[in-house]
Amino acid sequence: MRLKFLMLGLVAGAAVAAAPEAANPGPPKVLILEWTDLIPLGARDQQSTAPAAASHDYLGESGPAAVQQSAHAPVNTELDGKQVKIPGFIVPLDVAKDGTVSEFFLVPYFGACIHVPPPPPNQIVYVTSPKGIALDSIYEAYWITGTMKMQNKSTSLGAAAYSLSADKVEIYKY
Amino acid sequence: MPLAAIDLEHVKFSWPGAPTLLEIERLKVERGERVFLRGPSGSGKSTLLGLIGGVLAPSAGSVRVLDQPLHDMSAAQRDRFRGEHVGFVFQMFNLVPYLSVRENVLLALRFAPARAARIPHPERSAEAGRLLAAMGLADPALLDRPVTQLSIGQQQRVAAARALLGGPELLVADEPTSALDHDAREAFLQLLMRECAAHGTTLLFVSHDPTLGALFDRELRLDELNTAT
Amino acid sequence: MSGTLQLALRSLANRRTTVLLTLAAIAVSVSLLLGVQKLRSAAREGFTSTVSGVDLIVGARSGPLNLLLYSVFRVGDATANVSWDSYQRVANHRDVAWTIPISLGDSHRGFRVLGTTDAYFQHYRVAGGRALAIHEGKWFGETHDVVLGADVAEELRYTSGQQIVIAHGAADVSFTQHDDQPFRVVGILERTGTPVDRTVHISLDAIAALHDEAAPTGITAFMVGMRERTALLTMQRALNQYRNEPLLAIIPGVALKQLWDLVAIADRALMIVAAFVVFAGLLGMLTTILVSLNERRREMAILRSVGAAPRHIFTLMVAEAGILASAGVLAGIAITYALLAAARPMLVARFGIFVPLGGLTVPDGIMLAGIVGAALAMGLLPAWRAYRNTLADGLTIRI
């Protein structure tokens, strides 16, 4: 008899302890991402995070421009709308008068715009930061925190599949 | 019973680790007295004036000025006391070169609020002028002249006016006439005495010139008073 | 304490010559520091405000900074041209929204002549997305129409309808003038604060005509706006790998950052030098005050005799240092503005840097306050010495 009451008490106690947890899930957690996370689970072994294959004859040097295959770099839809934190290199697009950058690409490796082929679309994030970030150096890596979104439009080759509205930018320390 | 203006008892002074410079068993000056102190160089004159002025604290004994125990006061309190109640005249270089005659006289009130309060603000400049005239410098054009343009005699008179401004109870004059010629000496002294008498100011006059002693109430010899020398 | 301040002022006024020299030293060093600071921010703003909204700039293969400099800043020269065929290929590409072709190489009385099309007026943006605007007249329509940048019109005092002659080559004076092909000013642009103001714009067809060609065969460079911004990396890659001729495509934001990094080293070095100069000026002030201490011992004794405490002496010395430094800083600010105002035209003409004469910024203010603070700190040394002296001297006036 006493054992029964003890069990009831334990269960009741556990329920009481758990209730606030259920009612208040706490602040949304920030997902810390690696670039492989941007590739959906199923496609990960087929695609590496390395640069995309050279787009064949994009400008049609040997005859008429090749018909573009719609780039099916698959996207990880689970990331849509999530708060994420992801490290990478910045390719600035718009530099304001005071030197801050409000629009940029985030890519997994340095030199994506200089001497190395660009990453595949699901390895490029197009980031906007309304108040602009002070970019000290394009040679450094940065942590970008913000809300991830899928690009709804059909992505042409070399486009970015993901976009992100940045809340916070920090230097990446090794 | 009038309080003593200056009262030193069993006073000793030495710098730390140095031999005693000054040792006086008893020195008393009454209020309103005019005392002539004969003190040649090396007799401890600077030390004595420093003690009376409150820039130095005795190593032993009591130093009372206007019945205030300077030996018990902090340095800041002694500085303040000096500003409020004592006027000084030195042998030379009494005046601040970058201030005018008027400003030099008014300097007496700059660090002594109670002394300044005795003269209402708008009347201060006039009072300075009155004292200068009393000391024989009646020309109003003189007031704004830079002090570097004055003769020694004139400078000493300005210094005297400053020492008297605001009616301090004690005036200490350290060889004020030594740089003046004979005639100027007498004249200066006459004017100074007259002003002190008019306000009941105690006068302690230090000099090595014995001919002036006759004008004073009492004559003291520092080399006899100071048992350290 | 205002009594002490007044004493300090009178004391300084008495030593006019020495004080003025010290003041001058501080003022000059402060103006150097402040001037460098202002030039820095003007240069940075000048760089970053020149162009916006352009996804790629394409030219013959040289170096990224070189391409940026001549295409946007009109400084320097291209080593080769881009063929018309290659340009058309890109201009007609389905992923491209617009292009602005430009052709440089001619000059008019010291100003660079730029050949371009309507696309320049439609799509070229300066910082903050500001489009070009007509101040007077209109954009060119006929082959020999000319549109002037604001500075060109102002300095050469040209008005609408004026006839001018274009020279070949980019030197100030050239002896191959195209006298037989007079041009007519049809429009003047609003001021942009960028190198656009110092450019003479004509049509590409006019450039071709100047070289006795029927149609353009090549251009110096072109700017690209993609339909989708996110596609520019692929286009850039394709252009850099283009097999038909050696081309270079740069992202303006990246190239600007690289340019700025290059400049930043010199810029930082300049700031350090300027800071040292200010320090030297303050040391001069310190010397002046220290040297005067000895002859002021009598003055201090006089002040002590009228009731001043050693701390009053201390404060007096610190106040003198503070007054000297503050006056020096204020004079320095005045000198900076005077010099900048005088040098502005030259800076715009030679380097394309437009220096706005705004007020002092918060960082400027902090820096200047810091200088006064440093001076006060340095003033502690003579103040301390004077303090010690007066304790030892008392009322004794040493002759």
Image: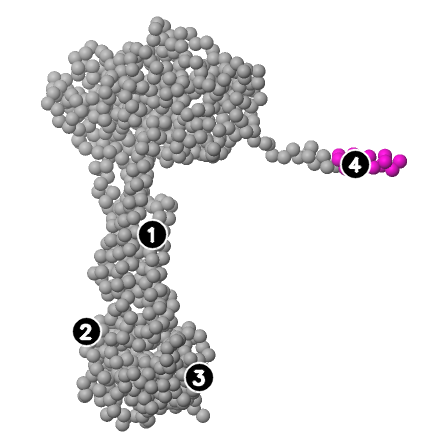
Please report, as a chain letter, where disc 4 is located: A
Amino acid type of the residue that numbered disc 4 sits on in the rendered structure: Leu
Amino acid type of the residue that numbered disc 1 sits on in the rendered structure: Ile
Q: CA distance from mark 4 to mark 2?
A: 103 Å
> SS class of the residue under badge 3?
strand
SS assignment for the magenta stretch, majority = helix
Q: CA distance from mark 4 to mark 1?
A: 70 Å
User: Which residue in the structure is indicated by mark 1?
Assistant: C371
Q: CA distance from mark 4 to mark 3?
A: 86 Å
> SS class of the residue under badge 2?
helix
The reply to whether label 1 and label 2 mark residues of one chain is: no
Q: Residue B61 — which label? A: 3
| Total marks placed | 4
Residue C393 visible (yes or no): yes
Instruction: Inspect the magenta stretch and tell me whether residue C345 lies in it.
Output: no
Which of the two discs, 2 and 3, labels the residue nearer the N terminus?
A: 3
Q: CA distance from mark 2 to mark 3?
A: 45 Å
Amino acid type of the residue that numbered disc 3 sits on in the rendered structure: Gly
Quarter where residue A78 is shown: top right
Residue C265: x and y, percent? 32, 37
Q: CA distance from mark 1 to mark 2?
A: 39 Å
Please report, as a chain letter, where disc 1 is located: C
User: Which residue in the structure is indicated by mark 4?
Assistant: A10
Classify mark 2: residues with Cα within 10 Å, few (<14), some (14-19) or many (20+). few
Part of the protein shown in magenta: A1-15
Residue C179: x and y, percent? 11, 19
> SS class of the residue under badge 1?
helix
State the residue at coordinates (30%, 41%): C269
